[in-house]
Amino acid sequence: MTTWRAPEEQLPPLLYMFRNSTGKTSIVVLEVLLLVAQQPRTLTELEEVTGIGKKGLSKAVKPFTRHAIDGQMYEPELHLFNRRRIIGGRADTFKLTLTAKARALLESVA
């Protein structure tokens, strides 16, 4: 039995961009991208809307955000999200916002 695979030119551009940069496509990241495009959101807000736990959400968006690894800053190939700390919030409280690259990517497929 063979499985059918869509030719690259038929893949939606957004999915193709994700597949090129990460080797796999995460529907969770796509959902978060579209929700954050509407307005900046915290992980708690995203958890309420998606039904996915904060740990799963954080794990899904981490490859698309700048973060430190062993004291060195990691710059993702496809940088989509910025983490903005909420002043006066807990140490782990932040809002996700879109980068200019993410906005441009969404505009190119609209």
Image (tube, helix red, strand yellow):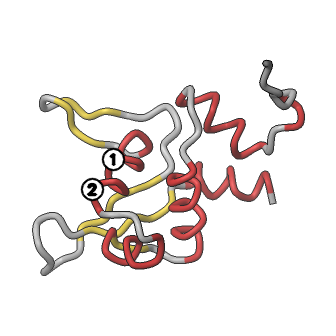
Please determine whether, in this image, residue 105 is positioned above or below residue 103.
above
Q: Secondary structure at mark 2?
A: helix
The residue under label 2 is 55
| Frontmost residue, 61 versus 27 | 27
Relative image position of residue 7 (x, y in whole percent): 87, 27
The 10 Å Cα crowd at callout 2, few under 14, some 14 to 19, many 20 or more, is few
Q: Residue furthest front?
A: 1
Tell me the tag on residue 74. none
Relative image position of residue 30 (x, y in whole percent): 58, 54
* Amino acid of disc 2: Lys
* Amino acid of disc 1: Lys
| Frontmost residue, 82 versus 28 | 28
Which residue appears at 13% of the width and 81% of the height? 88
Q: Is residue 72 left or right of residue 28?
A: left
Which residue appears at 27% of the width and 42% of the height? 67
Which residue appears at 51% of the width and 54% of the height? 28
Which residue appears at 58% of the width and 75% of the height? 38
Please determine whether, in this image, residue 41 is positioned above or below residue 29.
below
Q: Secondary structure at mark 1?
A: helix
The 10 Å Cα crowd at callout 1, few under 14, some 14 to 19, many 20 or more, is few
The residue under label 1 is 59
Q: Answer with the quarter of the image where residue 110 lies.
A: bottom right
Please determine whether, in this image, residue 75 is positioned above or below residue 66.
above
Mark 2 and mark 1 residues within 8 Å of each other at the beta carbon: yes
Relative image position of residue 95 (x, y in whole percent): 34, 69
> What is the spatial separation of the Cα atoms under label 2 and label 1, in whole angstroms?
6 Å
